[in-house]
Amino acid sequence: MKTILVVNGENYWQEFLPNDFVVQKKIQTTEWILKNNKLYVIDQDGVCMPDKILWRVGAIKPSPKHKSALDIIQLSDVPCVNSAKVLIQGFDRLSMLQALHSCKLPVVPFNITTSSSQLKNIEMKFPFVVKAGNYHGGFGKVLVENEQKWQDIKDLLFITNDYITIEPYINYDKDIRYLAIGDKIWAMARKGKFWKANVETTDFVLIEPEEELAAQTRLLKDYLSADIIAVDVLEERDGQRYFVEYNDIPGLSGFPDEVRTTLANCLSTL
Ligand SMILES: Nc1ncnc2c1ncn2[C@@H]1O[C@H](COP(=O)(O)OP(=O)(O)O)[C@@H](O)[C@H]1O
Ligand SMILES: [Mg+2]
């Protein structure tokens, strides 16, 4: 029986890993030690010496400590799903975008600056989307439709030390998420109350994966050597598609139980 440490995430993993001992801890309240090449993970419930790790840290505010924990996992050689290397590449939004770029996937065009003082040099035609820093779950993202709103947003962005990207607003017909685990692929179309499909989601349906997007998702998954990957794609009415991001710790809700058994299987076969 192996000890599997689940970091954050869903509380059902013991059910999907009946032959293992599942311990769950929160990244926000754990400390990590690597001593004599052995990994120890500590919180108020005690110490865990994991044989394997399932990293399910979702849309919380990323902190430098999360990155340190991933570096320590990588140094410890304790196998992790996704691997610590994959999670480190996806940790920051810019290195995530770099992977999409390297795979020559049709990424939504964007301008970047390291400082809000340079916003005037990267603005584009209205409407556009501003994304500040490295946040998930729709956080730090705003749609700017006109000069008046832009003025206010620029004043607000003055207070951030994060990098900022600006990209055209895609007036999409479909917001699609492709999820790949092992050699399986699922696809979902989502609708939100407003422009962000993943915030106040009002509707999501599983759809039949299409060959082109499935192949592009597989290409990225193979490039990264990931166990699990999701890509977010916006499709315009005329069929034009743009990749907005990939997520190496995607949420699984709304997908069938098969995704959970397939992910659990990735851990079992490590
Ligand atoms: N350039 C864009 N044009 C139109 N909608 C966008 C654009 N970028 C993001 N969105 C919407 O906002 C959602 C969240 O953006 P995303 O870049 O995936 O960040 P995250 O999910 O990490 O917060 C997308 O699923 C999409 O519905
Ligand atoms: Mg997204």
Image (cartoon, rainbow, N blue to C red):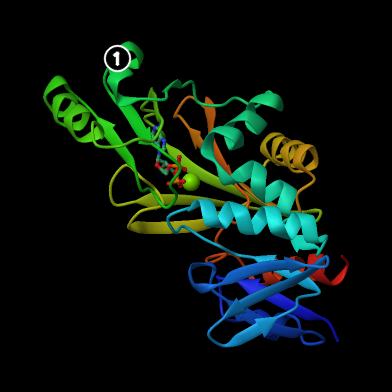
Secondary structure beneath dot 1 equals: loop
* Residue 5 position (above or below residue 229): below
Residue 184 horizontal side relative to residue 255, left or right: right
* Residue 262 position (above or below residue 42): above
Q: Quadrant of the N terminus?
A: bottom right
Residue 6: which quarter of the image? bottom right
Residue matched to label 1: 125
Residue 41 horizontal side relative to residue 66, left or right: right
Residue 237 horizontal side relative to residue 222, left or right: left
Residue 166: which quarter of the image? top left
* Residue 185 position (above or below residue 89): below
21, 180: nearer the viewer: 21
Q: Quadrant of the C terminus?
A: bottom right
How many numbered marks appear? Answer: 1
> Which residue is at a point 37% across and 36% down the rendered structure image?
132
Looking at the rendered structure, the kind of residue marked 1 is Lys
- Residue most toward the left? 148
> Which residue is at a point 73% across and 60% down the rendered structure image?
73
- For label 1, count other residues whose C-alpha is less than 10 Å away and answer few (under 14), some (14-19) or many (20+): few
Residue 196 visible in the picture? yes
61, 136: nearer the viewer: 61
